[in-house]
Image (cartoon, rainbow, N blue to C red):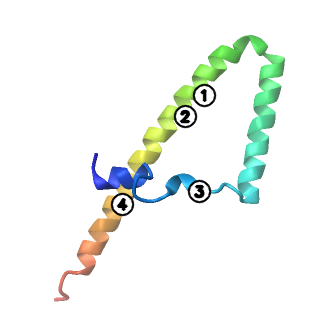
Amino acid sequence: MNIIEEMYNGDLFPIGTYDHCSQEYKNAMDKLVAAETELLKDYSQVKELFQKYQNAQIELISINNRQEFLNGFRIGAQIALEMIKPID
């Protein structure tokens, strides 16, 4: 594992301590929970399949978030390297 991945995983910085306390986040979460509750109430026979779908989606989002973090960090480092070049 490289240092950028360690940073992403929270081994170097406490990214896991981010507090989702914004009203916008709470509103979006409320909508998600309400929709899930309604879906599973009306279609209880798909509960197991829905759980598999959620797990697969979470895995994809996690992979994507990690890759986006790594790409963003690399771009930032390239910008920093460009900034230290002498001005012609």
What residue is pinned by disc 2? Answer: 58
Residue 76 x %, y %: 35, 66
Question: Could you tell me if the residues under marks 1 and 3 are in contact, i.e. CB atoms within 8 Å?
Answer: no
Q: Label 2 crowding class (10 Å Cα cut-off): few <14, some 14-19, many 20+? A: few
Q: Secondary structure at mark 1?
A: helix
Q: Label 4: few (<14), some or many (≥20) within 10 Å?
A: some
Task: From the top left corner, tell me how far across and down residue 5 is, in percent.
Answer: 35, 50
Identify the residue under disc 1: 54
The part of the image, by quadrant, that contains residue 1 is top left
What amino acid type should be assigned to the residue bearing mark 3? Answer: Tyr
Residue that appears at 59% across and 23% down:
53
Of the two numbered discs 1 and 4 on the same chain, state the one appearing first in sequence: 1
Q: Amino acid at mark 4?
A: Phe
Q: Secondary structure at mark 4?
A: helix
**Circles 2 and 1: CB distance less than 8 Å?**
yes
- Kindly state the secondary structure of the residue where label 3 is placed: loop
How far apart marks 3 and 4 lie (CA) works out to: 18 Å
Q: Dot 3 corresponds to which residue?
A: 18
Sequence-wise first label, 1 or 3? 3
Compared with 21, 79 (above or below) is below
Counting from the top left corner in percent of width and height, residue 42 is at 83, 18
At x 78%, y 24%, the residue is: 39
Question: Badge 1, how many Cα within 10 Å: few under 14, some, many 20+?
Answer: few
x 77%, y 36%: residue: 33
Q: Nearer the viewer, residue 88 or 56?
A: 56
Identified by mark 2, the residue type is Ile
In the picture as drawn, the residue positioned furthest to the top comes out as: 45
**Residue 17: image tag:** none
Image coordinates for residue 69, horizontal then vertical, percent: 41, 53
Question: Label 2, label 1: how many angstroms apart (C-alpha)?
Answer: 6 Å
Mark 2 → mark 3, Cα distance in angstroms: 18 Å
